[in-house]
Amino acid sequence: MVSEQIQPLDKVKIKKYILTELPLTLTTFTLPRETEAQIEDIVTTFLEFTGREKIREHIVYCIRELVANAKKANTKRVFFLEQGLDITDPADYQFGMAEFKKMTLNNISHYLQMQKEKELYIRLVLQIKKNIINIEVRNNAVITNTELIRIHDRVARSRQFNSLEEAFTLVLDDSEGAGLGLVILVQMLKKMGLNEDCFDISGNENETVAHISIPLDQLQVKNISLLSDAIVKNVKSLPHFPENILAIQHLIANPDADLGVVARQMSADPALTSDVLRMVNSAQHALIKRVDNIFEAVNMVGFRGIRNILYSCGTQKILGNDSDDKKHLWEHSFKTAFYAYYLVKKFKKDQNILDDVYVSGILHDMGKIVFSTVYPQLLSRIQNFCHKKNIPRSTFEDLSAGMNHAEIGAQIAEKWNFPDTLVNAIRYHHDPASAPKENRNVVDGVYLANMLCEFENGNIAFEQFEKAPLANFGITGKKQLEAMLKQLRQAFERENEKRKYFM
């Protein structure tokens, strides 16, 4: 008997994926009934947290249809393999399909076991990104041209039907189970106010991907946007960026700036000098010996490095670490910075962006830290704004839990006149594909480092990493990523010991 281990439903983790726009994935090889029930529970919880429970029945049907088709496609592959038939050959395909249904139904456990042995998976991916619910069902049985033509024909023919009742009058082709099911799927989309353009099935060299996109209600999107803007405008209760740091930044911006003048200006502030020396002596600069002199530190790091260190020091000074939540966020940020720095150093070998990626890692969660720093006056202003604009309290709660924190952090960074590289790293660290091309390596580095921290804590799976940043850094598989993470973890532990020594 083929069996699979079923993980208990974790509602807290599902909500975290929604708030941070991470993909939620579930992978199965045989799709037993228990897994089908679990998929239904996950989809239900996902839609409840996004306020879309009214479309539950429609979405559950669509996913059930797509995973069943993916399972059948995998079964078809092992059946053709066992029969010695070439599924891409039209004659073999026609011959095999004549016997496929009867032979597999009579011995389905055998073929399911073969699917598991061949590691033919079915993977459900749920994600909210750019205010769109994306649903994907993936399987690693690559679709053939014949199958793709049949599916696209079914979808095209579904346009003629105005209701489910009309669709049921379609004459089924018993050799292909994707007939009526896909027609009904398109009808389900219509009932949700969508059309067939929101649904697509495609193939690449590794997978077949069925994709449904559902735009979120525009009112909710507008609420989030309005509230984000209001929060940024009302951070007047946060201090302005420190004047002493702004003065030093002004000196550095001068093309004729003198290292000695900059160092003297910094040394006039003992607290700032201490913070700068601490960061210069961190793994960011990989110094052989400790540096205790601010003049030597400025000379070794250079203006660009000092500029970025000052942005980090100023932000930490403003936002503080006077609560457990903030301490946890800063600890995560420093680990992200460390990982990002070493990823860029090892895989990109670009000295020009090392300082940028390190400080971007430290500052990437500014938006979350701002929420941990919300003063009573600011909270009162935001609540009044929500009341005037008739924005539900839940919208603010979603923001405070993390939703849109990247945009809020980026807008505050712009308010404080941070350079574009840092602003874009903060804004796009969950959405690297949207980052400007000139900042892609920095953003990808911060994205991967942040995801590695989540992966290390067991919060996400390898399949939840976006492929483009992995490819950009030459990471081709899970084993390579795990080996690299082990090295990073060990190096970070050594850095923590070093930091204790320097403090």
Image (cartoon, rainbow, N blue to C red):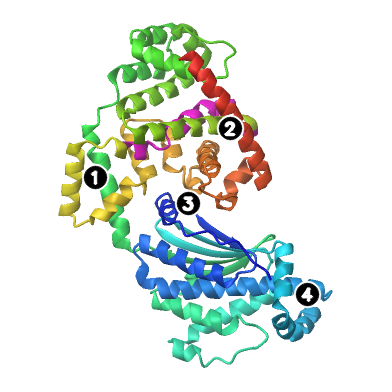
Of mark 3 and mark 2, the one earlier in the sequence is: 3
Mark 1 or 4: the one toward you: 4
Query: Measured along the vertical axis of the image, is residue 263 above or below residue 179?
Result: above
**Circle 3 residue:** 22
Kind of element beneath mark 2: helix
Of mark 2 and mark 1, the one earlier in the sequence is: 1
Relative horizontal placement of residue 399, taking residue 252 as reference (left or right): left
Kind of element beneath mark 3: loop
* Residue 439 in picture, x, y percent from top left: 51, 37
Q: Is any atom of residue 283 visible in this view?
A: no
Magenta residues (range): 347-370
Pick the quarter of the image with the N terminus: bottom right
The image quarter in which residue 488 lies: top right
Kind of residue sitting beneath label 4: Phe
How packed mark 4 is, by other alpha carbons closer than 10 Å (few <14, some 14-19, many 20 or more), is some
Q: Which mark identifies residue 489?
A: 2
Labelled pair 1, 4 in contact (Cβ < 8 Å): no
How packed mark 2 is, by other alpha carbons closer than 10 Å (few <14, some 14-19, many 20 or more), is some
How packed mark 1 is, by other alpha carbons closer than 10 Å (few <14, some 14-19, many 20 or more), is some
Give whichever of 39, 438 is nearer the camera.
39
**Circle 4 residue:** 80
The residue depicted at 40 percent of the width and 71 percent of the height is: 56
Labelled pair 3, 1 in contact (Cβ < 8 Å): no
Residue 178 in magenta stretch: no
Q: Which mark identifies residue 230?
A: 1
The residue depicted at 59 percent of the width and 83 percent of the height is: 179
* Residue 244 in picture, x, y percent from top left: 31, 16
Of mark 2 and mark 4, the one earlier in the sequence is: 4
Measure how far apart labels 3 and 2 are at the Cα level. 23 Å
The image quarter in which residue 174 lies: bottom right
Kind of residue sitting beneath label 3: Leu
How packed mark 3 is, by other alpha carbons closer than 10 Å (few <14, some 14-19, many 20 or more), is many
